[in-house]
Amino acid sequence: LERLDLRYEQERKEFRQLLPDSDRCRAMLDLMFDHRYAASRQEGLLYQALSIGAEESANLQRSLNRWYGSLLTDIETELADEHPQSKTTDLRAVATGVIALYFNAESMAPLTERKTVFQDSKRAAQRLVETLKWNG
């Protein structure tokens, strides 16, 4: 669990460093939904097992919640920077939707054409992010 936490923090740091100075939300979605960087089948199975095990382990549950919370905060921050007029509740809802689309693509990738499911999920995430332009 400690190794996974360290690995996730390193990947999170590297991910933020890959984002350019401008148009960060587009770049964020490009990176998140690039099928070439998707989790392997083994990583997907590991995450599912950890999620199920979290019901029995408070330590595991805290770790996964910390990981999810960090991801949610990172996405919300990028959205807020690009859409400062948006309400916090709307930013949170859109960030949650983007994560849901990402996890769905990860979970469906072994069952369908990997590239297609990530492309479709990315388009859905882009449409969701665009709804922030309509708020004000």
Image (spheres, rainbow, N blue to C red):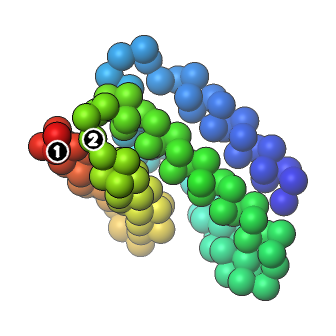
Given contact means CB atoms under 8 Å apart, are the residues at marks 2 and 1 in contact?
yes
Q: Residues within 10 Å of mark 1 (few under 14, many from 20)?
A: few
What number is the disc on residue 78?
A: none
Left of 96 or right of it: where is 126? left
Residue in front for this viewpoint, 27 or 39: 27
Left of 72 or right of it: where is 13? right
What number is the disc on residue 86?
A: 2
Residue in front for this viewpoint, 40 or 70: 70
Q: Residue at x 30, y 46 (%)?
A: 87
Which residue is under mark 1? 135
**Rendered location of residue 113, percent (x, y):** 34, 61
Q: Residue furthest top?
A: 21
Q: Could you say which quadrant of the image residue 136 lies in?
A: top left
Inter-mark Cα distance, 2 to 1: 6 Å
Q: Residue furthest left?
A: 134
**Rendered location of residue 81, percent (x, y):** 38, 28
**Rendered location of residue 77, percent (x, y):** 46, 36
Q: Residue at x 76, y 44 (%)?
A: 7
